[in-house]
Image: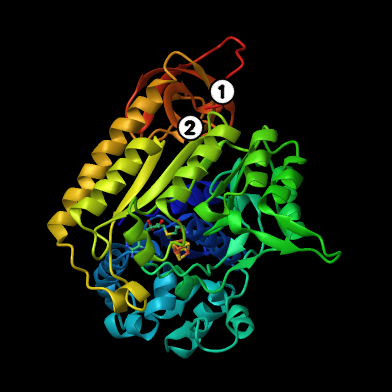
Amino acid sequence: MRPSFAARRNLRNSRMSDTTANRKKLYIETVGCQMNLLDSELVVGKLRNEGYELTDDIGQADTILYNTCSVRQHAEDKIYSALGRIRQLKQVKPEVTIGVLGCMAQKDQKQILRRAPHVDVVVGPGQLAKVPELLVLAKEQGTPQMAVSLPRTAGSNQTVTESFAEYDPMREPAMRPSSFQAFVRIMMGCDKFCTYCIVPSVRGPEQSRPASVIIDEARMLADQGVKEITLLGQTVNSYRSVDAAGRTYRLSDLLERLHEIESLKRIKFITNFPNDMTDDLLQAIRDLPRVSRYLHVPAQSGCDEVLKRMKRMYSVALYDDMLARIRETVPGAAVSSDFIVGFPGESEASFEKSMQLVERGRFKNSFIFKYSPRQGTKADTLFIDDVPEEVKKRRNNDLLALQTAISQEDNRQFLGRPLEVLVEGPSKSSKGLEPGEVGQLTGRTACDRIVVFEGNERLIGQFVPVIAEEASGVTLFGRVVTMDLVAPRA
Ligand code: SAM
Ligand code: SF4
């Protein structure tokens, strides 16, 4: 089984710093969103301080962890089949400790132990600080250990919120998957309760971290050499915190303060909620040159009736108006979206309206998902999952084909233009580069466009000007420019 990208990158770091042969070996696999990648980074960091080192060989591991996602059934199926595959390994090596962390742990709780009795530790995303202690307890006592947060209806908002503890313990350079990029959590949980979505149950009530804590963390990351930070929140533009002096910070205020940290060359933030795309935020993006002109703001559907059943709390007209405001205030901004196809009651006519929204939205890209019923959500109790799987598949393909054609057109506008690219690493097709070796590299523009080009491994972590020469729906292909050119923001 292949380790996750994060595990592989962490492993690279671990090779540099770990020299002892007798440290406990940790194998971790992460599925899901950037929040999960950050959680895994923090869990790994904590465990490395407790004497673990990462391995990418599951057969060598003393501890095997899965950091899980429950947004769609497919993500859960992947984990249950991985757990099925390692049942035998546990029979031959009973001393191995197996843990299931994250959203699926919170959602399924004891059901995980029923379906996979060889699991030793189950820890929800609001209890991750307990992972090291529970791994020890499971070993000492020989019984499964579980730490999960309260259900949303179990008590007052404060009691439930307290059970979803903040988990941002430390940011040590050696623990990060990349030395020059970092995620910074600014919000936890979600209170929007879209009817299809499991996130509010498994990640708990919406909480904004204090601005001063976020600014300190960003400053520390910058001092450690980080050039790009990505602020994370389920609805990142709903951010609001009040400091001790009574001053309210919105996302725009936070961006302004973070922009004062000059060595942060790029500041990104995901994911936005359409209703909260306020003018002050758009003006901040316009006025702060190192804030990326990139907005991921999911529409989910182009049909008002479907949006109403999804309880998205906006209309298509509001979304269109938001797009117009973005384009007027922040010219050249790249907008990306998410769509769900086959939501209960989605007729051909409703789906056609999503196609029309993609057509006129001119998104840089869209993530398209087939509706997946989630137990415990409103949609699952209120509506019948009545769109047949083959229809969902066809709609998914049609929307994706339309979006890919638009993305390719969008990418073509950059042909022949120099782009400022932050080089992230070897491209998917190159196996990895030795120090100083030349090969295919990949990076991103400030607007999140992927650029692939030939270059020296030493460029990783640098901003380089690249002239785009070819465009596909997902990628721009180009060559490094050697002369000193001023690159436009793309
Ligand atoms: N908070 C973000 C927002 O509101 O846009 C997104 C969070 S969710 C983890 C990421 C995406 O998964 C959503 O935008 C939605 O398109 C998709 N999603 C969530 N629940 C789903 C479900 N039950 N079936 C299919 N897709 C789903
Ligand atoms: Fe889920 Fe809606 Fe919250 Fe996004 S805003 S996490 S889709 S409930």
Dot 2 lies on which element?
strand
Question: Residue flagged by tag 2: what amino acid is it?
Answer: Gly
Q: Earlier in the sequence, mark 1 or mark 2?
A: 2
Disc 1 C-beta below 8 A from ligand 1: no
Label 2 environment density (alpha carbons within 10 Å; few <14, some 14–19, many ≥20): many
Quarter of the image where one finds residue 390: bottom left
Q: State the separation of the CA atoms marked 1 and 2.
A: 9 Å
Residue at (20, 57) in percent of width and height = 347
Judge whether residue 48 can be spotted in this image.
no
Question: Residue flagged by tag 1: what amino acid is it?
Answer: Val
| 342 to the left or right of 72 | left
Q: Are the two marked residues, 1 and 2, in contact with CB atoms closer than 8 angstroms?
A: yes
Compared to residue 449, the image places residue 125 above or below, namely: below
Q: Which mark is residue 456?
A: none
Query: Percent x, y for residue 425?
Result: 47, 35
| 218 to the left or right of 378 | right
Dot 1 lies on which element?
strand
Query: Percent x, y for residue 134?
Result: 52, 80
Q: Nearer the viewer, residue 231 or 334?
A: 334
Q: Which mark is residue 443?
A: 2
Q: Which mark is residue 464?
A: 1
